[in-house]
Amino acid sequence: MSDLDQHLAHQLADVQQRIARAAQAAGRDPHTVMLLAVSKTFPADAVRAAHAAGQRAFGENYVQESLDKIDTLADLRASLEWHFIGPLQSNKTRPVAEHFDWVHSVDRLKIAQRLSEQRPDHLPPLNVCLQINVSGEASKSGVAIAEAAQIAQQIAALPKLKLRGLMSIPEPADDLAAQRAPHRALRELFERLRADGLALDTLSMGMSADLEAAVLEGATIVRVGTAIFGARDYSH
Ligand SMILES: *Cc1c(COP(=O)(O)O)cnc(C)c1O
């Protein structure tokens, strides 16, 4: 094993242990929480090393960077799951529909319609989450809680998408109670939509700093970058 392989195996084990402890505290089976390793800004070699340690699902934010990485790692494609989690402009939906397994950041109907139209027929439906603005600020991306039910029903009807659930990126908060509040709001919305008849199974919430709070509130996917790969360098 290379140094990078060993380092990433260690970081991944640490994060898995944090997830397991939080799940146990919540009386949940740790296997019901999937770790999405957020590899944005990190090179293909880092993804390869994490894969060697058993990690299978990776999250990316930037279209061009992720396409390069997916291409470089084509030999591993059958055992990798690629999740797009960044802001998505409508003129960039096609490569995402063609190359990803999941999109967590659907925040308007038009994006969902384009992804459905552009999803190639030979691929299974694209798994999507509706991004919700749980902090309620106009500047933040995501659908308002009050509008979520209508948009979710419209997305669920699109032929080449499978609406799996909800995603959010709350404002950072320091203490556990403040971290839990927006995650709880997302879970309550999720439960209302399920009661309305939508077959949702995914709550994508929690990052390096607040994954325990998210798991305590029912997260089924936590999206973790820094705690696995280290601090991001945006200078090049
Ligand atoms: C970058 C990013 C993450 C990971 O954040 P960390 O704090 O590094 O764990 C998770 N979700 C989204 C949407 C991101 O953009």
Image (cartoon, rainbow, N blue to C red):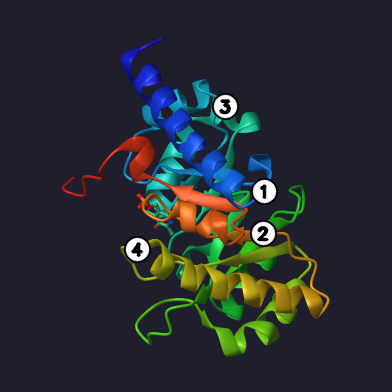
Q: Please name the amino acid that badge 4 sits on.
A: Asp
Q: Specify the farthest residue to the top.
A: 1
Q: Which of marks 4 and 2 is nearer the N terminus?
A: 4
Q: Where is residue 63 in the image (x, y as percent from the top left)?
A: 43, 54
Q: In which quarter of the image is ligand 1?
A: bottom left
How many residues crowd mark 3 within 10 Å: few (<14), some (14–19), many (20+)? some
Q: Do the residues labelled 4 and 3 touch (CB within 8 Å)?
A: no
Q: Which marked residue is nearer to the observer: mark 2 or mark 3?
A: 2
Relative to residue 220, is residue 125 drawn left or right? right
- The quadrant the C terminus occupies is top left
Q: Earlier in the sequence, mark 2 or mark 3?
A: 3
Q: Indicate which disc residue 76 carries.
A: 3
Relative to residue 188, is residue 140 drawn left or right? left
Q: Which marked residue is nearer to the observer: mark 1 or mark 3?
A: 1
Instruction: State whether residue 175 is above or below residue 36.
Output: below
Q: How far apart are marks 1 and 3 (CA)?
A: 31 Å
**Residue depicted at 41% across the width and 56% down the height:** 210
Q: Name the residue under label 2.
A: 202
How many residues crowd mark 4 within 10 Å: few (<14), some (14–19), many (20+)? few
- Quarter of the image where one finds residue 175: bottom left
Q: Please name the amino acid that badge 3 sits on.
A: Leu
Instruction: State whether residue 9 is above or below residue 129.
Output: above
Q: Name the residue under label 1.
A: 28
The answer to whether residue 140 is seen in the rendering is yes
Q: Distance between the residues labelled 4 and 2?
A: 25 Å
Q: Indicate which disc residue 175 carries.
A: 4
Q: Distance between the residues labelled 2 and 1?
A: 15 Å
Q: Position of residue 214 (x, y in %)?
A: 51, 58
- The quadrant the N terminus occupies is top left
